[in-house]
Image (cartoon, rainbow, N blue to C red):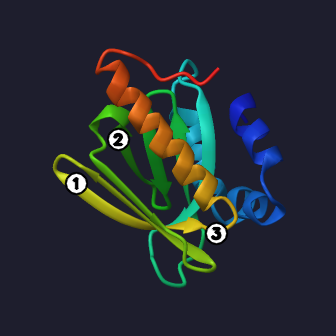
Amino acid sequence: MRDDIAEIISTLPQSSRQALTATAASCVALLDQHVPAAENILELSAASVRLIDGPLNSVFALTEERLLFAAPLPQAISWRLGDISSLLFTPDGTLNYFQIKAPGSEYSFGLDAATGSAFSSAVTLAVAVARLRGPERVVSFT
């Protein structure tokens, strides 16, 4: 497993670690194997394609350039941070509501209650920084 993914998982609450290493393990493996090594993964959150009572069998990843979503089958969606036009995060008990809008797309997901708020805040900041830096710049928080 990539060092960045392993380090992030090790810092998460137990319930989130369990979701990412068990029910969403194939999605984490998809990221691990196919995200370019030069693109650092900054944050992870377990997710669900279903908004109500969905299993946390998917994963969101925030990189320096993109927001990534991987789900079983496998399926993947990628948004360049500067292209995201709107984010909506609504805490809702055990599964938070997370909506992403970009030109030509609008998606809604369930987001891990244990990490959803912090993940949403990190994505919101990354999108704002990407817009300020312009389309040719990479976001870096280090």
In the displayed orientation, state which residue is furthest to the left: 104
The residue singled out by tag 1 in the image is 105
Q: Cα distance, mark 2 to mark 3?
A: 22 Å
Q: Cα distance, mark 2 to mark 1?
A: 10 Å
Query: Which tag, 2 or 1, sits closer to the chain's start?
Result: 2
What crowding class fits label 2: few (fewer than 14 Cα within 10 Å), some (14-19), or many (20 or more)?
some
Query: Which tag, 1 or 3, sits closer to the chain's start?
Result: 1
What crowding class fits label 1: few (fewer than 14 Cα within 10 Å), some (14-19), or many (20 or more)?
few
The residue singled out by tag 2 in the image is 79
The residue singled out by tag 3 in the image is 113
Mark 3 and mark 2 in contact (Cβ < 8 Å)?
no
Q: Amino acid at mark 1?
A: Ser
Mark 1 and mark 2 in contact (Cβ < 8 Å)?
yes
Front-most of 93 and 46? 93
Query: Which tag, 2 or 3, sits closer to the chain's start?
Result: 2
Residue 51 pos. (x, y %): 45, 77
Q: Quadrant of the N terminus?
A: top right
In the displayed orientation, state which residue is furthest to the top: 136
Label of residue 91 in the image: none
Q: Amino acid at mark 3?
A: Ala
Residue 60 pos. (x, y %): 53, 51
Report the residue at 59% width, 60% height from top. Answer: 116
Secondary structure under tag 2 reads strand
